[in-house]
Image (cartoon, rainbow, N blue to C red):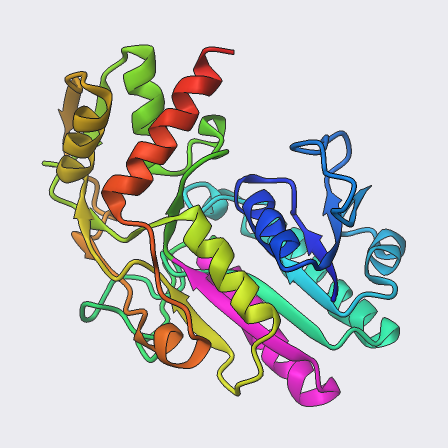
Amino acid sequence: MKITVFGGGGFIGSTIVDRLLQDKHSIRVFERPRVPAYRAFLPDEQVEWMTGDLSDISSIKEAIDGVDVVLHLVSTTLPKSSNENPIYDVQSNVIATLQLLDAMVEKKVGRIVFISSGGTVYGAPKYIPIDEKHPTDPEVSYGITKLAIEKYLHLYSHLHGIKQVSLRVANPYGERQRVETAQGAVGVFIHNVLKGTPIEIWGDGNVQRDFLHVSDVAEAFAKAVTYTGKTSVFNISSGIGTSLNSLMSMIEEVSGTPVARNYKPGRSFDVPVSVLCNKLAQDDLGWSPRISMKDGIFRTFEWAKKESQK
């Protein structure tokens, strides 16, 4: 199939593109201006690299012309800072996605897979593990816009017959994660260990999160691209809670270096446990996580160590 991947040059997007290339799909990557290709593609890999702005309608139309599927991985905001400017969050994400959907209708592109957020759309957990029927009460604008986009995808499916799947991804980590975005405990912790700087922990370190290796995320997207079932929203998660203390112990084991820890007072908005149920994805999408936390930490640490030596 011909697939346009919006955000295909980033941490998650590049891993998804590499996975889709294994299935011999033809890929058109759409990235921000001045974002270079993350690697040299092989002669038998069909990859076209485009740059532009998701809010530019003419660029969007060009990017999806003649393709079968759109993967929407772009977000202009981060969960922790999205409340600072909700108007920008809506304009740059919700409005831009509506323009993309209108372009898909015009260009007769019949399928879209969207990366939603398992960590923010549900809000404070009412029960654990969180399944797809859990109430959605986001406490950050980032989660609200993700949920709004999910609803608009449903609307366009109803109005125009677009096949749509939203994947509510837990806490992805792994190779190519950029530490400078300050998103992702695993990447930040490993970076600090390699730099020899202490890790700051809010609270006692017993907060549990659902970490998922990026290769498992990519596998879920590969499944969703060809999914023919009726379900439109899936949790994509490990289904296992890992505390920050356990995470640091794993990094210590892999690195062979003690982790310096600075514990700070807990924050009111940090929920004690957030673990997603992935049973629906296993049963209906035919997907399940393959990479254990220890293996994933090892792979991520080895990659980060090589990067730090460049």
Is 35 within the magenta? no
Q: Could you tell me how many numbered marks the image carries?
A: 0
Determine whether, in the image, residue 205 is placed left or right of residue 107: left
Determine whether, in the image, residue 39 is placed left or right of residue 302: right
Residue 186 visible here: yes
Residue drawn where x is 87% and y is 66% of the image = 66
Q: Is residue 43 above or below residue 179?
A: below
Q: Quadrant of residue 129?
A: bottom left
Q: Position of residue 244 (x, y in %)?
A: 18, 38
Q: Position of residue 281 (x, y in %)?
A: 39, 73
Per the picture, the main secondary structure of the magenta-coloured stretch is: helix
Residue 141 visible here: no
Q: Is residue 237 above or below residue 77?
A: below
Q: Which residues are magenta?
A: 143-169
Q: Is residue 167 above or below residue 28?
A: below
Residue drawn where x is 53% and y is 85% of the image = 229
Q: Nearer the viewer, residue 26 or 251?
A: 26
Determine whether, in the image, residue 118 is placed left or right of residue 62: left
Determine whether, in the image, residue 252 is placed left or right of residue 162: left
Residue drawn where x is 11% and y is 43% of the image = 206
Q: Nearer the viewer, residue 69 or 104?
A: 69
Q: Nearer the viewer, residue 251 or 270?
A: 251
Is 152 within the magenta? yes
Q: Quadrant of residue 227?
A: bottom right
Q: Quadrant of residue 42?
A: top right
| Picture quarter with the N terminus | bottom right
Q: Position of residue 262 (x, y in %)?
A: 16, 21
Q: Position of residue 123 (x, y in %)?
A: 32, 62
Q: Residue furthest front?
A: 44
